[in-house]
Image: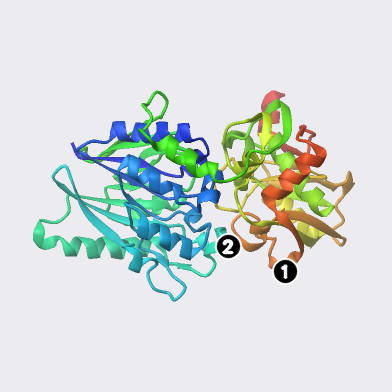
Amino acid sequence: MVRLVHYSDIENVFDDPERAARLAGRIRALSGPDAAVVATGDTTAPGVLSLVATGRQVLDFYEATGTLLDTFGNHEFDYGPDALRDLVADAPATFVSANVRDEAGEPFGCDEGVVPWAVREVDGATVGFVGVTDPATDSLNPMAADLSFDDPVAAAGEALAEMRQSVADEGGLDRAVILSHLGAGDDDLARELDADAVLGGHVHSRRNETVADTLLVRPGVNGEAVADVDLDAEPPTATLHEPAGAEPAPGLADALAERMAAADLGEVVDTVGEPIERSGEVVHGGECRVGNFVADAFRWAHDADVGLSNAGGLRQGDPFDGDVTKADLISLIPFEEPVALASVTGGELRDVLREMAAPEVDFGEEDWWHGHVSNARLVWDADAELIMEATVGGEPIDPDARYTVAVSEYLLHSEHEFPTLSERHRIDEADIQYEVLAAYARERGIDPEIEGRIEIRNRAAAADDD
């Protein structure tokens, strides 16, 4: 049986060395002489340990799991292109990337060993791999702003053709697999290209289905699951396995803990009595306590009219419960970007609030909520996709007035989530985001409440209730 063991978007799993060791243990248990271990990006960052080690903690993980191949996610670039080049050069895994170009427009990392495609023998079968990354990465990640990203479908198609031609005289490929960090774009790869499987990531929900006779798999975020892909099946199939119960990979927890010990992040900034959840369902489900905490801290840092946090910037993990350390806050927002202050008109502010529902933004799942606010209230009609009420400080928003909004700097750079905001709105900046959270927690504490800041109404549901 020809198999692939696939993981992706493990992000802050390294912040808990024992959890990372169990994940590696599950991968090792699923692997074997008939299998190859592959990954599909966001494996190096973000996270507390990632910030401390500039992503290099993944080298320990690659060694422990025998990872053969990986591709670039948007977070691989969190510490800049040069840091990534250094990591790639030292990695035991090979990075496969067909559509990322460097500052000069050349294929990224070719001198460090990055290749557009790779052919490997897996249990006697010749399997070809092509890697692609979300072309919006230069917008998603300011550290990738100097890079460029080719159309992934065209780039993958060219790489597949070149790869097939290269092995044509040796019997050709038995299977072709695309390692993708596109998210929703995986469907386009399946429908337009001749591949047996698209192993994906980027979007944090799990997926395991066949589209156009092509297997599409996503294992979720933070090591929630590992995919065991059977390439012998027609078409290929996959089974998702959770790490629970796996024997930890020997030595990995100690290696990660040693890296973490190099940073002094154990300061307790406050103690939480009622656990504060930060799962994906919570942060993308509408108003939540952790979202209110972050938005309040952002607004406090600038004494702004409104605080705004994008839900996608709040990293998932264990609840805050009991003592909350600086490391915990970094795990929530592990990005070295400041809290920026923007000046917008009331009309623009209404547009920004509307974009929290992302009615026209292709990002995440259809029912995801994308923002959290402080000192503002929004009533949203989910059926009509309209704002029913929008206030700041209890007063209706004046479309001609100007308002200050404290936001992650990322939102001024990216057009991906809140396209109304841009660099032209910037008027000031405060400290790094996690430093702002820590300062706010020391002074004001961490005790957010649900206050009715965001109300999502569904007229069809209301009619059913009647």
Q: What residue type is labelled 2?
A: Pro
The residue furthest right is: 395
In the image, 411: left or right of 127?
right
Question: For the image shown, how many numbered marks are present on the structure?
Answer: 2
Identify the residue at image location x=46%, y=40%.
Answer: 256
Q: What element carries label 2?
A: helix
Q: Is residue 208 above or below residue 135?
A: above
Mark yes or no: residue 200 visible: no
- List x then y, in percent, for residue 285: 64, 36
The quarter holding residue 7 reads top left
The quarter holding residue 162 reads bottom left
- Distance (Cα) linking label 2 and label 1: 16 Å
Q: Are marks 2 and 1 in contact (CB under 8 Å)?
A: no
Q: Which amino acid does label 1 sit on?
A: Arg
Identify the residue at image location x=31%, y=56%.
Answer: 130
* Residue receiving disc 2: 142
The quarter holding residue 118 reads bottom left
Q: In this view, does 118 lie above or below 249?
A: below
Identify the residue at image location x=55%, y=59%.
Answer: 141
Q: Nearer the viewer, residue 52 or 427?
A: 52
* Residue receiving disc 1: 424
Q: Is residue 149 above or below residue 465?
A: below
In the image, 419: left or right of 78?
right
- Number of the label disc, if any, that sits on residue 359: none
